[in-house]
Amino acid sequence: MNKMKPLIVANWKCNPTSLRKAKELFEQVVEGVKKEKNVQVVICPPFIYIPTFKQVAGKAVKIGCQDCHWEYHGAFTGEISASMAKDAGCEYIIIGHSERRRYFGETDDVVNKKLKAALEAGILPIFCIGETNEERRAGKTEAVLEGEINGGLEGINADDFSKITIAYEPIWAISDGDPYATKEMPTPENIKKAEVLIKDLVAENYGKKIVGAKIIYGGSVNAANSKSYLKEAGMSGLLVGGASLKAEEFVKIVKNV
Ligand code: PGA
């Protein structure tokens, strides 16, 4: 089997505030990473910018989105389906991000339906899991990850699972936009431990053959710490929030791979 290229995903969240600024950032990133052949860069902007970006993306970056509705179409005011996202040019989709779970009430059941909708539409899901600080302090990390993995992957077969990338994002490490803000950060050892746990949970669902599950890390990734998560913790890639909004910083993260 070919070794997968590290996956570096930019999660722009609800930023930037205009198409002009978004296009500028997008073009700077494309320019900065276009010669990097050993990495797969994915940019997940707000939906509304996607059609414009698709025209200028070229081969250097792939486009993704940050959410979708679980239904194919219908009377669901304000929603965008996975098949619409696919049609607009999305190849990846972030599902179950902690901000969706926290601010929009997404349960494991909803996440499961969205994962299935994305797979059905032919988009590669980036399935987010992670514990809060309270859960971590209470020694519940394992139980939380187990619940999210088992609930999120319910009824998804091994073939489809192989298309999913799991993003381990300890919620206590996710930034409010500044990935250098002082706060507690997981060490590569912490992450390695979580990765082993996730692989065990996946193996319980799919059997040992899936031990090669793709697991990426997210939470205050910046150009100064990105290497340690890839090299020391051995993650398959990174999900980058705040740092992906600064072209120079994000390009450095990509080049550090
Ligand atoms: P952050 O966000 O890099 O700003 O911590 C990561 C994420 O929420 O995906």
Image: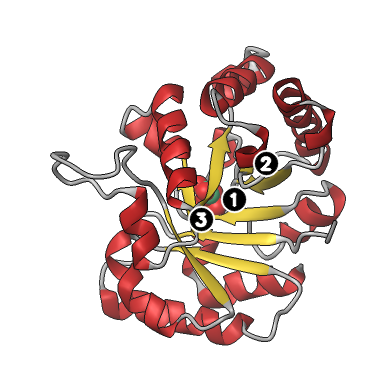
Q: Is residue 237 left or right of residue 192?
A: left
Q: Position of residue 188 (x, y in %)?
A: 80, 43
Instruction: Of the two numbered discs 2 and 3 on the same chain, state the one appearing first in sequence.
Output: 2
Q: Secondary structure at mark 3?
A: loop
Kindly identify the amino acid type of the residue bearing the numbered disc 2. Answer: Met
Q: Secondary structure at mark 2?
A: loop
Mark 3 neighbour density, 10 Å: few (under 14) some (14–19) many (20 or more): many
Q: Position of residue 181 (x, y in %)?
A: 55, 51
Q: Is mark 3 within 8 Å of ligand 1?
A: yes
Quarter where residue 141 is shown:
top right
Instruction: Of the two numbered discs 2 and 1 on the same chain, state the one appearing first in sequence.
Output: 2
Does residue 14 appear in the picture of this structure? no
Quarter where residue 174 is shown:
top right
Q: CA distance from mark 2 to mark 1?
A: 8 Å
Q: CA distance from mark 2 to mark 3?
A: 15 Å
Q: Nearer the viewer, residue 126 or 136?
A: 126
Mark 1 neighbour density, 10 Å: few (under 14) some (14–19) many (20 or more): many
Report the number of numbered marks: 3
In contact (CB < 8 Å): disc 2 and disc 1: yes
Disc sitting over residue 241 in the figure? 3
**Image point (40%, 76%), residue name:** 54
Q: Secondary structure at mark 1?
A: loop
Residue under label 2, please give it.
185
Q: Is mark 1 within 8 Å of ligand 1?
A: yes
